[in-house]
Image (cartoon, rainbow, N blue to C red):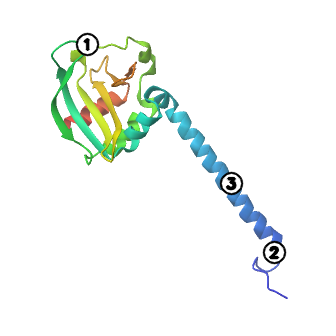
Amino acid sequence: MAASTNGPGMPPSRGRSLVVGLVLLGLIAAATGIAYQRWQTRRCLDFYGPEVARLVASAPRVELLTLAPGAGPGRLVATMVRDVTNAKGLVHLRRGLVEDANFAWVDSAGPARRPDGAWDLALVFSDPKVPAARATLVIDLDEQTGSVAVLGKPGRVGLGRIGRGLAKWVAGL
């Protein structure tokens, strides 16, 4: 007769039931975590689109551009370009840029067009291995009317509580 591995006095099926119960509990916890994550980022995904959101969260290269109005309406010129791929705090900034709670969504209904001089900087997220994988966020850091837009897409959204942290991060570079 084979010895039971469930311990003295424990029926063989009880240990199996415990393992199955723990696996089910783990699956429920994972599904809850995924649902919560989607709920936290659903508006950002709608605003950015899935490809831009993916690049913001995980692109291997990130550049910071300081902007100024260019020659002609609707033109911006980068006065400074800086590689910030390894900058301290970038991981937290990336996470903040895809969380709904960091933005003032009521402002997103405002006029999409901003004066050319309103845009202070841009963050360019790219993958050098895939030339087409590139997303540019243009940012107005004004404390009252600050906003972010995706270059080439309509609309903008208010910076909300991420605005001060973003300005502080840029100033500390």
Which numbered disc, 3 or 1, marks the residue that appears first in the sequence?
Answer: 3
Query: Residue 114: x, y in percent?
Result: 30, 14
Q: State which quarter of the image contains the C terminus.
A: top left
Judge whether 71 appears above or below 18 on screen.
above
Q: Is residue 88 above or below residue 119?
A: below
Q: Secondary structure at mark 1?
A: loop
Residue tagged by mark 3?
Answer: 25
Residue found at x 31% / y 43%: 90
Query: Quick check: 35 left or right of 95?
Result: right
Q: As shown in the figure, which amino acid type bears the numbered disc 3? A: Leu
Q: Is residue 165 left or right of residue 53?
A: left
Q: Nearer the viewer, residue 153 or 25?
A: 153
How far apart in space, not on screen, are marks 3 and 1 (Cα)? 53 Å
Instruction: Answer above or below: position of 90 versus 16.
Output: above
> Looking at the picture, which amino acid does disc 2 mark?
Met
* Mark 2 lies on residue: 10
Q: Residue at x 81, y 86 (%)?
A: 2
* Image position, residue 70 (x, y; %): 17, 19
